[in-house]
Image (tube, helix red, strand yellow):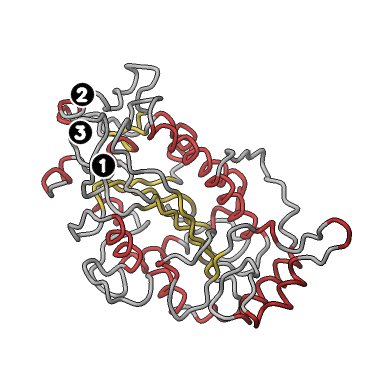
Amino acid sequence: MPAHECETFGAVSRRVFVKAGALGLVSLGLDPLFLGRTAYAMRAPGKKTGSKVLVCVFQRGAVDGLSMVVPYAESAYYNVRSRIAIPRPGSDPGAAIDLDGRFGLHPRLAPLKPLWDARSLAIVEAIGSPDTTRSHFDAQDYMESATPGVKSTRDGWLNRVLTHRAEHRETPFSGVAFSQQLPRALQGSAPALAIPDLNAFGIRAPGGTRDRLTAAFEQLYGGGDTGVIASTAAESFEAVQMLKQANPSRYTAENGASYPRGPFGRAMQQVAQLIKTDLGMEIAFVDVGGWDTHINQGAGEAGQLATRLDEFGGSLAAFSQDLGNRMADVVVLTMSEFGRTVAENGNSGTDHGHATAMMVMGGGV
């Protein structure tokens, strides 16, 4: 998206957002400006029940920020999206949900509206990397390294956060990705873990078969699979031991929260589980894919985007409800590698664009 179009479709202004003290998401150097802003947000007043946690949610595939957060006051939006524009609030059952008289949430993000009303959800529009690449791989790499246009950076920006914090050596759980492999953002010199499923640890098999912890102990230095990916075998084994003691397989969501069935809902529930175990997690990273909507993107309640946003919004809302007062110590940041074109394409979808929308939820917002 050209720069002038990014400004035309700007939502909650970046200047006002930064002034409010939540986050500033602009960086060209090795230590992104938004790291300091994130730390500020995580020091916000409120009931303190544990350590501060940043949860980074990466929407891989380039989410369409103009349908996720709809600039319904802009006539140009409807002029160039005759088939996929989200209807103005009040005009249709699948219409946008009004936020401020200019912008609205996609109807499938209705579970997030109470968080907006409570001033615990902020939206940053027309934002992204200054690099102009339309390659998913390169753009994701630049967002996770926070060095746009520079491929030689060896560590991720989240790992640099951990490197700057002295406490990160006290627990192997400082940085945790809920995925099959360690994402680019958490790679570096500071300890970090990749855990695909918390419930796979310490579970005894039928008939007295040795549990995974015992098998992991025997295989650690032989390169066996522990279910935890760590910088060293020692860190991996320590993590397995701590998870065994915490017994995260026994978990019930609190405050009436109900997570959507699906990989993202399951991942966000497990982030909440690990936060509640008080094992010292400071950064959690969650991937959610399926945002590359070249075909049949849809408008309102129908189409690919609506399906993805249904689980997305429901999972974030359930996470906040589940944690309750602990959300005073948690900040959730959503991001994507880039956005979509303003104009729809011939397949009722959108192609690779530039800026998109990010959300920030929780303490300090």
Amino acid at dot 2: Ser
- Seen in the picture, residue 68 relative to 49 is either above or below; the reply is above
Quarter of the figure with residue 5: top left
The Cα atoms of the two marked residues, 3 and 2, are separated by 10 Å
Q: Quick one: label 3 or label 2, which is nearer the N terminus?
A: 2
> In the picture, residue 30 is in which quadrant?
bottom left
Give coordinates of residue 40: x percent, y percent: 41, 64
**For the residue labelled by badge 1, is the local secondary structure a helix, a strand or a loop?**
loop
| 31 to 74, vertically: above or below | below
Q: Which mark, residue 345? A: 3
* Residue 186 falls left or right of residue 125: right
**Label 2: element kind:** loop
* Dot 1 amino acid type: Ala
Q: Is residue 277 left or right of residue 26?
A: right
Q: Is residue 64 above or below residue 35?
A: above
Q: Residues within 10 Å of mark 1 (few under 14, many from 20)?
A: many
Please tell me which residue is depicted at 41% across the width and 54% down the height of the picture. 58
Q: Which residue is mark 2?
A: 82
Which residue is drawn at the image coordinates 24% and 47% (left, top)?
Answer: 126
Report which quarter residue 213 is drawn in: bottom right
Report the residue at 65% width, 59% height from top.
198
Q: Earlier in the sequence, mark 1 or mark 3?
A: 1
Q: Which mark is residue 11?
A: 1
Q: Position of residue 339 (x, y in %)?
A: 27, 47
